[in-house]
Amino acid sequence: MIHSTTCSLCLFLILLIGVQPILAQDDSLGREPLTLSSEIGGSIATASETPFWLRVNQFGSVPQKTPFLFAKLFGEALVGLDPQKCQWSFRTEMMMSLNEGRHLVLPEAVITFQYRGLEIYAGRRKEIIGLIDTLLSSGSYSWSGTALPLPKIHIGTRGFLPLGFTKGFVSVQGTFAHGWFGKQQFTFDYYLHQKTAFFRLGKPKHKLKFFAGITHFAQWGGYAPYVGSGIADTNGNLPKSFRDFLYVVFATDAPRGNNLSLYDSENRVGNHVGSIDIALQYNKNNSDWLLYYQRPVENQAGIAHNFPDGLYGLRWMNKKRKAISWLNIQHITAEYLTTLDQNLSYDSKADIYRGDDYFNNSQYLDGWTYKQHAIGSPFISLRTDTRLEWFNLKGSYAEGVYRQINNSSVRAFYLGLQGAIKNNNQFKIRLSANFLYIDYNVTTGIYGSPINQLSGYFEYIRKIQTLKGSTISVIVAKDQGNWLSNSSAITIRFKQRFK
């Protein structure tokens, strides 16, 4: 949980304070009034499980099982091309896949209103939230883009907006949203609360810029029939009044005897997840460097005691896109994730160590997941993602133990690379080595030997010269290790954009 009324008030100040009515980035330039595209393809593998890098960070659209065929349609209509005036956009994407049956997924179905520095939208929209390399990252810690987007009502700034009284040296970005989880496996009809607040020091033209901010998400309200009376009321109802919503927004203590369970009174109302983000960007000549760190925050104690947990990243981007030789490296991202600290502390009465157990929660038994996908870092996996031998690693359903996140004690190394071969061929590589720790010695405070997992992904994309706006892609992906099913897969995709 996050305990900070300051960060909550900061967002409101960002939205209310006078900012210059100009865009930090004009995302309308180059966009067409109407954009349509289609994509078809299929995948086949040596095992029934889709390899890791084929299915994660795909907004819940790629099937868990192979082989499969798919067809995807995308459309966007933009009303108003002048960013200084009101703009409306209507966007939708749907994907139909065929494997063990028909599956229709809508990763996007959203209507958006924009006016200068303001943006409001309603619906599902693809997002990666946090200070991170959004193009080639393994996934932002709190909101990676692995799960299907939740339906939301969102209000926020449109990029970073400069504060006039600082002459543009300080810029701010903020969002505030309400979303719906609906019915999941163990919890029904509950809500999402989201807010973010970031600032940037340095003008866009400056070579060196510093970023910092916080992301705060919370699951709240709803009905949880499987939890005990000490966790919810006797009927499984979780706090959902407007007063409870304010406790969630400001992450403050709720008074005892306020018709709350003992769990809510001793902790906070709702399940809180988030991160403290910092980043440093440096531009020189044709190189764009980004150094970033995302620190997990699930409660007040974790703010001070869970270091060095978090996602560390370094990104280099080549801004000179024209190839000077047959090979042009355009983008490299290296990341390291560790979640072994988890604010572990010794409970002398129970004679055990207790920790945050990232993404799991005793009230919201589905954890920080949506539609059977982790919302945050894909390296923190669901029990349904892993080998059958690890399914009951944290207890079985028959024993009344409900934990969707199989293991959140992870160390992972990741490398992403993107480039071009001449001018009509592109490629993308993702490689990861992660180590899963399941044994913790309460006497020594040391983890046992890890379970090892390697995953790789190579994509080759070629433009079809005889058919304008079309590309064909061939993807090879592989999992090898003791955590996921060993699998090799090949995927072929054909994409056509219409103007």
Image (cartoon, rainbow, N blue to C red):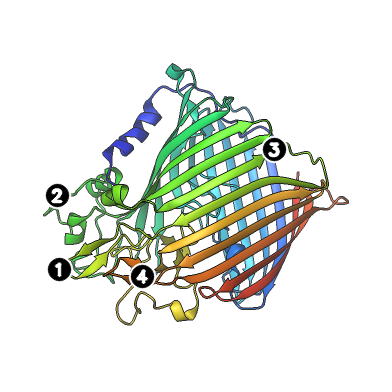
Number of marks drawn: 4
Real-space CA distance between mark 4 and mark 2, rounded to the nearest whole angstrom = 28 Å
To which residue does mark 2 refer?
Answer: 255
Q: Earlier in the sequence, mark 2 or mark 1?
A: 2
Task: Give the amino acid at mark 3.
Answer: Glu
Question: Where is residue 405 drawn, in percent x and y?
Answer: 40, 67
Q: Earlier in the sequence, mark 3 or mark 2?
A: 3
Seen at 28% across and 72% down, the residue is: 226
Real-space CA distance between mark 3 and mark 1, rounded to the nearest whole angstrom = 64 Å
List the single residue furthest toward the front.
444
Residue 229 appears in the rendering: yes
Which tag is nearer the camera, tag 4 or tag 1? 1
Label 2: element kind: loop
Real-space CA distance between mark 3 and mark 2, rounded to the nearest whole angstrom = 53 Å
Label 3: element kind: loop
Seen at 32% across and 63% down, the residue is: 361
Real-space CA distance between mark 4 and mark 1, rounded to the nearest whole angstrom = 24 Å
- Asked if residue 427 lies left or right of residue 136, the reply is right
To which residue does mark 1 refer?
Answer: 349
Task: Give the amino acid at mark 1.
Answer: Lys
Real-space CA distance between mark 2 and mark 1, rounded to the nearest whole angstrom = 26 Å
Seen at 31% across and 75% down, the residue is: 401
Task: Give the amino acid at mark 4.
Answer: Arg
Viewer-nearest residue: 139 or 208: 208
How many residues crowd around disc 4 within 10 Å: few (fewer than 14), some, or many (20 or more)? Answer: many
- Asked if residue 327 lies left or right of residue 238, the reply is right
Which tag is nearer the camera, tag 3 or tag 2? 2
**Tag on residue 403?**
4
Question: Where is residue 339 drawn, in percent x and y?
Answer: 40, 58
Label 4: element kind: loop
To which residue does mark 3 refer?
Answer: 32
Q: Earlier in the sequence, mark 3 or mark 1?
A: 3
